[in-house]
Image: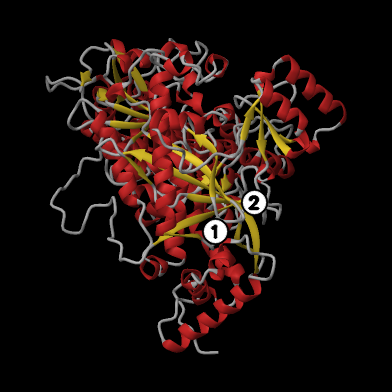
Amino acid sequence: MPHRPRNRDGNACVASSAASLFDAGTIADRWIADYCAPGRETDVLCAERGGGRDDAWNTVFEELAGLSGDSLGHARERAQRHAEDIGTGFRIAGEEGEERPWPLSPVPLLIADAEWKTIAAGIAQRAEVMEALLADLYGPAKLVTDGHVPAALVTGSPFFLRPVSGLNPPGDKHLAFIAADLCRGPTGEWRVLADHLRAPAGAGYALENRLAMARTVGGLQTRLNILRHAPFFAGFRDGLSALCRRADPRIALLTPGRLNPSYAEQAHLARYLGFLLVEGADLAVREDKVYVRTIVGLKRVDALWRRIDPRLLDPLAFDSHSTIGVAGLVDAMAAGNVVVANAPGTGLLESPAFAAFLPRLAEVLTGAPLLLPNIATWWCGQDAERDHVEANLDTLLISPAFGVQTLGLPEGATLGASIVGEARAALLDDMKRRPQDYVGQEIVRLSTMPVVTEDALVPRPFTLRVFAARGPDGEWIVLPGGFARIGEHADVRAAVMGEGMWSADVCVHCEDAVAPVTLLPSDDTTQLRRNPGTLPSRVADNLFWLGRYLERGEALLGLVRVLLGNSISAETGAALSADTVFRLAGLVIAAGAAPEPRAYKRPDLLALAKTAMEDEEGWYSVRAINVQARLIGEVSRERLSADMIRLLDAPVPTKGTLLDRAGTLQRRYSALAGQSAEHMARTDAWRFHDLGRRIERSTAGIQAIRAFGGPEATADDLSTLLDLADSQISYRQRYLTGMARVPVLDLVTLDPGNPRSIAFQVAAISGHLNKLPLLSDDGLAEAQQEQARELAAILVTARATRIDDAMLLDLSNRLCRLSDEVARRYFLQGAEALRAAGLVLA
């Protein structure tokens, strides 16, 4: 076999020589021949090859063969690794644990441009029909009056929001972004399984799939002329801007928070589109205008791309128990001062029951049939349709009509044939009592596509999620591709596939070359920007406490490591004195990291150290602190690098001795400190992160000095203090005569050149506060700046011989007050942002 070039990862690269290309083509031909066995005519690969259109699929498998030789398993692992590197993840609804990795198949779904144009036209038509429907149902309701839509279908839906009836959204458009799930039947026709209007999810996953696949098999883009995603997202962004009243609008993505199943996708989209990622608590309504709370006051928000359930969007208009919405948002929307995409109430049309009427409504509203038909649906709110569903129960999928749980279907949509015994009796009884709550739908048989299982290609059923957005001219544009969801099993019934177990990139390929459009600035752009944009107060708060938690965990870990004997004194053979050990343990206990031991013998100290480092049962251990840091990292994805997120998410080490595990954690803390010091731009966001680190380091340092630097300090105490301050080497380079209290205190407290001293931290704190924005224009220092300057003055004028416990206690109290003042001024807690004088409204 000819030699295949390798990249720096040691993986086979796409061959460039004729011999290597022939080798890859041979492997691809063998894979396809083995896969397209008789009986797989419903597969997209085999069906297209049967029609003579096999060049595109040959190209895909040649690229995969050039990447991984004859090992498909390696291609799957590489695609998965790239998806994880990008940071793609998801959470199952109701889960509070760690996110799951996004499952990406290395084999994309290929759709020819001519076929895609039919799909895109059908989706655009569907969006127009739904826009017209919403305008009527929330307006004059003529469709109800004329008998085209049963009143119960509207008023009986939990997603019909009466408070917005008669409200014309800004630009008179209810929809700005929609998604639809499509299926491909065995004979190649496309049909719509479901519509998503409330908070359409998945566009970010489609984008991330494309990014991961571009890294995996980058040659496909040019060899197949694959249509790009960037023009779609640019058009959506411009379309939202066109609906706003201001020329340079501020747009935000409104998220329910980190526990939302698609939070990772939302963070990625916000970063890619340049939107602020905000939660309800970040926003405030004042005089029918929406503002985001920032470190420089309230900043106007012109448009919100919401991912919150509309019923929770405004506690004054909808659910008064909502704690994640924005009070007064609907009033601001009614006044035309904020665009909400999609407008609340659009979820009305997601109901499966509406699918039974949509074909007829399309003809009434547009005079033309749907280009993409629905799956056949019968709403049981009508006598004839209910009789049909009951008579054909075993051949239909029975679903809740409005997408919410019913008494007869406690498990949701279910195959009628699987409902037997008491369950069937309960269903039929409830259908008689409340027939309007049920629909029957045909069971669709899906086409299949190839997916890699272990080291082989197997056919699996798939569905396709596509996306459409309103462009700047008001016309609908459709994302070329979307993403495919692939079933875990070979059963090709759409009803049993659920959400799918794998995803795949969807590549729309064409004959002509595709322009390399991107949302990133071009190489020759002259539009420069060094201002990173608006910093919401919540983000500043999170980054500040991320810094504090990381320093707090490192300080506690330092105590544990010294307690375990990892000090220079221990290495020379001298054990720490009992008094020093007692004070070390006392600091651990005072931190709430472990209970006081019954004795201070080695087994007791080992148990104390283990609890302080790894406890999960209520003590404030290093593990518990790391969990808090990880949670902040999850809600700060749009501000932190992927490497930093991975370090925060890394599991706690379990191998080796306790001291070995402590060393591994220490190296991880060092890596995180390096990430923030060397890879975070020097923006206000970084300043808050570093400010938190400096305040926490100062506080921990003062505690250590008070414990080990008193007038009666022994050599063991002073050596321990130098260990905790990471200043052993600096001290020994300066002083060769052994431990002395005053030099040690000077080094760890007052030396402005020691990056671990208290004076160094306070100088950094003051420097950050001097560069952060102020509210007033009078040029006078604000409270937080004054307090930092007073701290710096105390340390500059202090002498090591005069350091005592009273002075250290005063410094500690001043740091606590300074931290509180920073929080009060910049984090704008509670409703203070609406009361404080001098806040800028822009």
Give the residue type that dot 2 points to.
Gly
Q: Is residue 69 visible?
A: yes
The foreground one among 830 and 390 is 390
- Residue 715 at x, y percent in the picture: 50, 45
The correct choice, above or below, for 518 with respect to 746 in the image is: below
- Residue 786 at x, y percent in the picture: 24, 23
Task: Give the labeled residue for mark 1.
Answer: 80
Give the residue type that dot 1 points to.
Gln
Q: Which mark is residue 487?
A: 2
Binning the other alpha carbons within 10 Å of mark 1 as few (below 14), some (14 to 19) or many (20 upward) gives many
Quadrant housing the N terminus: bottom right
Which of the marked residues, 1 or 2, is nearer the chain's N terminus?
1
Quadrant housing the C terminus: top left
Q: Residue at x 15, y 48 (%)?
A: 527
Q: Residue at x 51, y 40 (%)?
A: 630
Q: Is residue 11 visible?
A: no
Q: Which mark is residue 465?
A: none
- Residue 330 at x, y percent in the picture: 37, 15
Left or right, 120 with reference to 583 = left
State which quadrant residue 411 falls in.
top right
Element on which disc 1 rests:
helix
Binning the other alpha carbons within 10 Å of mark 2 as few (below 14), some (14 to 19) or many (20 upward) gives many
